[in-house]
Amino acid sequence: MAKRILVTGGAGFIGSNLVARLVDEGNHIICLDNFSTGPRSNVSHLVDTGRFELVDRDVRDPFFFEVDAIYNLACPASPSHYQADPIGTMMTNILGARNVLDLSKSAQIPIVQASTSEVYGDPLQHPQCEENWGHVNPIGVRACYDEGKRSAETLFFDYQRKHNVQIKVVRIFNTYGPKMQAADGRVISNFIVQALRNADITIYGNGEQTRSFCYIDDLVEALTRTMATGPEVTGPINLGNPDEITVLGLAELIREMVNSRSKIVHLPLPHDDPRKRRPEITKARTLLDWKPRTKLSEGINLTIEHFSHILSDERVARNVIDQRPCLQGVSFPSGRLGRQSDRPE
Ligand code: NAD
Ligand code: UDP
């Protein structure tokens, strides 16, 4: 049955893919976003369906909407984004969680919380299962995100115990795919954009660190299945693809798939960068009857297509501007054009 659903952070990478699916299914979506890392253009076309409202608001400020369910996704997710405003990131996690939980409590509606594999920090157990408590540096540069998400989980479980709120906490592992921004800063978008531009592919550290990448459509399927579970399912549930790869292996795969002339270069490893990450997904398999279906090469192919379109649109825009002398000196809007290092193609 069609529902009214609030999605915070609905203009972002995961949010925009999720709301497209929910609107397609006939639901009415209220998308709350402050557009700090997700552009309006990811979702503005959905307004024409008549089943999509775009609300320009910050999740840290209290709000009220008449809805049947909530997905709480509002939070920058790329390390370069969340570290640019660490206090804002921490507060988005904590105040955002409090605000969605208060709404969920008063309306008695279920709420899916986008938590993260970062709650495991630089993990001591491998693969990571939900019983692991994590290994996080509480005063490091990643803490605003890791500890912010951990605090949000604490609030979720306290609201559940104190007020019987129908919480559903999912711990999302690295996810990728269409609607990521070229300047997002995460590894798959960086490597694909660099490979398409024949620019240097930037590996941080020696590239032996591992990640396990889940394609966006698989994740969206898991999120909707989580929402459909009964009130006894509170999580936490790991959502991710257990296929693990080194960062160096990923760089080589992308360079080969793009048929790129890029060189691989090494830059310093960021502080507290987790050395390995791989989800144990037995809980997701049993509680949601879910497993990821998209192979890494398939998903990367679809993501290469997405970025090829973005880059060719940018080239067209640049040519149009370059050919109009009256516009000399016009600077490109930040975040879209000319922000990545541009090499001759
Ligand atoms: P994203 O940065 O693309 O999207 C986040 C969205 O939240 C953006 O549209 C942004 O404008 C919005 N936002 C940020 N702060 C806000 C605020 N204070 N008020 C209102 N809106 C705000 O990131 P994403 O990859 O789509 O991640 C979505 C959620 O999933 C995040 O909570 C993230 O922590 C979680 N997650 C993502 C991944 C992943 O691999 N993509 C992994 C683990 C967890
Ligand atoms: N990384 C890299 N080059 C880049 C971007 C990221 O080598 O241009 C590495 C990063 O150091 C980390 C891994 O890729 O080890 C995944 O980084 P990402 O920012 O995508 O997500 P994280 O898992 O760190 O949150």
Image (cartoon, rainbow, N blue to C red):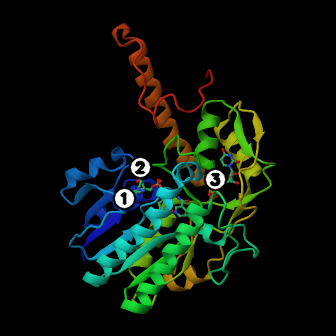
Q: Which residue is mark 2?
A: 38
- In this view, the residue in front, 185 or 245, is 185
Mark closer to the chain start, 2 or 1: 1
The count of marks equals 3
Can you identify the residue that label 3 sits on? 297
Cα–Cα gap, marks 2 and 1: 8 Å
Q: Quadrant of residue 102?
A: bottom left
Task: Name above or below for residue 148 compared with residue 302.
Answer: below
Q: Residue at x 51, y 81 (%)?
A: 289
The residue that mark 1 highlights is 10
Q: Considering the numbered disc 1 on the image, is that residue within a helix, a strand or a loop?
A: loop
* Location of residue 49 with respect to 134 vertically, above or below: above
Q: Residues within 10 Å of mark 1 (few under 14, many from 20)?
A: many
Q: Give how far across and how far down residue 42 sits, in percent.
A: 37, 48
Depth check: give the residue in front, 101 or 185.
101
- Which residue sits furthest top? 325
Q: Amino acid at mark 1?
A: Gly
> What amino acid does circle 3 point to?
Ser
Residue 152, image x, y percentages: 49, 73
Amino acid at circle 2: Gly
Left-right relation of 294 to 224: right
SS for tag 2? loop
Q: What is the secondary structure assignment of the residue under circle 3? A: helix
For the residues labelled 1 and 3, the Cα–Cα distance comes to 27 Å
Q: Is residue 32 left or right of residue 168?
A: left
